[in-house]
Structures are given as C-alpha cells and as structure tokens.
Amino acid sequence: MKKITSSFVIAVLAGAITLGAYKIFFEEPNYTVVSESSETPVFNTNFTPTSAKGAGINEVDFTVAAESTVNAVVHVKNLTISRGPTSLMDFIYGSGGTERAQVGTGSGVIISQDGYIVTNNHVIANANQLQVTLNNNKTYEAELIGTDPNSDIALIKIDGDRNLPYLAFGDSDVVKVGEWVLAVGNPFNLTSTVTAGIVSAKARDLGMGGKQSFIQTDAAVNPGNSGGALVNTNGDLIGINTAITSQTGSYVGYSFAVPSNIAKKVIEDILEYGNVQKAILGIKPVPLNTPYAREKGIKDIDGVYIDGVEENTGAAEADLRRGDIIKQIDDIQIHKFPDLTGYLSTKRPGDEIQVTFARDGEKITVPIVLTELQTVIVPEMGLEVKNLTKEEKKMYNIDFGVRIVGVPERYRGYGLDGKILLALGNEEINDIQEARMLFGRISKYGKTVITMMNENGERERLIFQ
C-alpha cells in the first residue's frame, strides 16, 4: 500500500514539474490590459460600416402613413350583366343565352376632394353599374370618366356630400429599391387592409416586351387589392397596385404597381384630352435574351441598343443611328428597355428630353422632341391600326376612322389588312387612341361587330363571336 501511495505522489510531482517548465520556457505570454472605463467594449467582425439604427424595422413608423391612407382608399364594386351561351346551338349561332349578373370587387384611391378616384381598368371593365364604398361605410354610385387599357388605369367619380379625404401623387422616379412601402386596399372584401413591405425592383415589364414598367414590392397584395394605393412612409402615393404573379391566384411574395408618375399623366390626359397622349422617341430596340440578341452579341448590354430608327420622328431628326446605346434620359439612368418606356409614359408629344447615348466609346447628349404615336395594337383582337392622313380622309370623303396595317394570324383569312376601320359596334373610331379604348371594352362572351371601308369606298360589316 505504501509503495502505491509513493508512486502516485511521484507521478503528481512529475506532472506538475513538466507543466511548470512548459509555461516558463515555451508558452508565449498573453497579457490582458484592464482599464477603468464605463464604456461597453465593441468588437468589429468585418470592415462594413453598420447602421446606427440596427436592422431598421423597429425605427420605422408606419402609423402616420397608414392613418393618412386608409380613409382615401375605397372599395369598388363592378356590376356586370353578361349574356353567355347556354347550349351548343347558342354558341354556334350566337343567339339566345341567359343574362347573368356578376359582381367584381377591387379598390380605388381618391385623388381629389371633389371625388375623382383612380383605379385599375380591369376593376371596372364592362361595368353596367359602379358602386364605391368609403372607409366610413358610405356608399355612392360612381361615373366612369375614362380608361386606358394599355396602362390598366381608369378614372371614375363620385359626388360626395362633403370634402373627401384624398392622397396626393408622389414622385415615383425617386423611389429607391429597399425603401419601405405600404399597400392599402380591400383584399377578399376585407376593407381598409394595410400591409407592409419594401420596393423589390423597379421597371418590371412582366413579359410584356418592355411596354410596361411596374414597381415590384413584397407587400402582400391579393385579389381585391387591385386599384389600391402603394404609399411610402410619408404617405405619398407612389403607385397603384395592379397585379401579382402566382400559380395559385393569391399572394406568394411578388406584387406590382403602376408607378404614380405614369398614373398621374394618364389621369391628366383623360381629363384634358379625353384619351391618353402617347409620345414616342422613334427607335426600334432589340429585345434582350432572344436568339437575335445573342446572334448580334448584345445579350448583356447595359442600356437600350438601337436596332433601327423610324422616319419622321425625333430620333431621326437628332441623327440617332443603329448601334447607338441609350444610357440616360434627362436625370433617369437607362439600364433596360422598361426604364426607357416607363419614363416616356410620363411624357406627351411635343415634350423635349435630353438623351445621352454611347457611340464608338463616346457619350453624346442631344435634345429630342417627342412625336405622337402613329400606330397601336388594339386589345383582344390584336389588330395594328394607324391614324389616317389628311389625304386619305379626303380621298374616301370621311372625317374619322383608322387604317388596319397589321393583322394577327388568326384573322388573316378575313381580308382585313389595309382596310379602314370605321366603327366598333355603334361607336365611331376617330383615332388610334379611341380604337384602343373601345377594343379594350370587348367582352369575351359577346359579339364583336366592326364596320370597315375597302379600297373602293364600300362599307363592310363583320361579326365575330
């Protein structure tokens, strides 16, 4: 027993001597300096400056914007009477059928004290009756003032008995990606619903070939939100909520709004001219991510590549050429085609803009006067129509009508190309803007009757079911 105890003591002493020798002769000294200070020590883990507000969400106050917005956002009901085929014979011969009342709902934004309301065109399309319910549950009959199917904006009006709460248009051009926004509307008939998110992207075209330019947000938007307000934290109206992308029909993280600068211009045009004044630059761009773009080696260009210039336009007069790349218009940076079309949608024919483009490695800035759009593709039927010249009106002894200059494949067998389109139903067509508006009202379940004039001056009528 004594031998075991002695061995254990010797082992402990040997270990202590070894550890002490290592500490003295081999281990590097590590000193900690302690000073008297009341400050909390701070440790930097990288070289990126941090925000004084931390994550930021706790520092943002949404209540002021919400309170100033909910009373200016209304519930819009669209009563539509449609007659659809109820049998195969009705479908073939286009007769009979049963009238059905359908009620669609959406939202709108009061933009003036006297009751003007902006909403989406698809919210009020084909309406036989429009009703507007305010946040205080008062209901009014609404009058349709005008629409623009191209931008999906419509203007309606109610006659209120007092000064109504309204929202002022903000400047959507200065909106920044990452900025906090609120979406206010009536999803699923739930009135005065407010959701929050950030601006996810700008100048989205949703596969429309660059013809539209949406603000994308991740604020929750669902059916019924269409036509409602997108506001910043100051309560400024920066967009009209319009669409979502979803396989289910409900919100999945993406929502889109028409920028306020576009909506404001459309509304002003409707009030002043009765239709939307469309201005064009006069260039033919190359759609990116197409075989043609890849073949030309311009798939990843930053800007808008000019593939052609139209005659008698501002671009032609300013000597823009094929191969030029537009980089900036006024103070707006141009990275892709929707940046260009979105800004041009806020302009009118006759407006002058400053265009900066790259040519042979050099940047050039020139003033360009925008010209009037001469052709449009009308909704539903997809016909391309052009305004008549004074000579054509004199030749056919008419003072209204548009010429058909492009026909989609499904209508090629009807001999429409080159004829003058005079009327849709019982309404005369005076110009291409009116043609676009009238064709935008076509019902998918009704008859479409068009009146045309051929090259001999003879009138023809076609009925499409």
Image: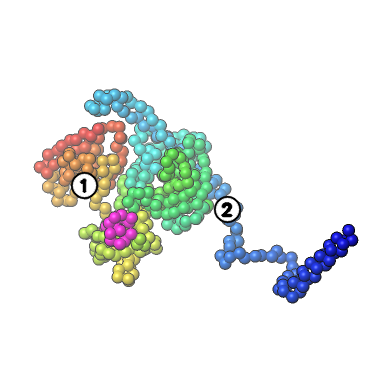
Residue 325: x and y in percent read: 31, 64
- Asked if disc 1 and disc 2 are in contact, CB closer than 8 Å, the reply is no
Name the residue furthest bottom. Answer: 25
Kind of residue at badge 1: Gly
Residue at left offset 28%, top offset 32%: 446
Residue at left offset 49%, top offset 44%: 220
Q: Earlier in the sequence, mark 1 or mark 2?
A: 2
Asked if 187 appears above or below 180 in the picture, the reply is above
Give the image quarter of residue 102.
top left
Name the residue furthest right. Answer: 2
**Which residue is labeled 1 in the image?**
406
Asked if 65 appears above or below 334 in the picture, the reply is above
In this rendering, position of residue 126 left or right of residue 137:
left
Q: Label 1, secondary structure: give it.
A: strand
Residue 246: x and y in percent read: 43, 42
Q: Which residues are magenta?
A: 279-299
Name the residue furthest left. Answer: 456
Colouring convention used in this rendered image of the protein: rainbow
Residue 313: x and y in percent read: 24, 59
Residue at left offset 31%, top offset 46%: 275
Alpha-carbon span between mark 1 and mark 2: 52 Å
Towards the viewer: 49 or 300: 300
Kind of residue at badge 2: Ile
> Which mark, residue 77?
none
User: The C terminus appears in which quarter of the rendering?
Assistant: top left
- How packed mark 1 is, by other alpha carbons closer than 10 Å (few <14, some 14-19, many 20 or more), is some
**Which residue is labeled 2 in the image?**
57
In this rendering, position of residue 130 left or right of residue 360:
right
User: The N terminus appears in which quarter of the rendering?
Assistant: bottom right
In this rendering, position of residue 199 left or right of residue 49:
left
Can residue 341 be seen? no
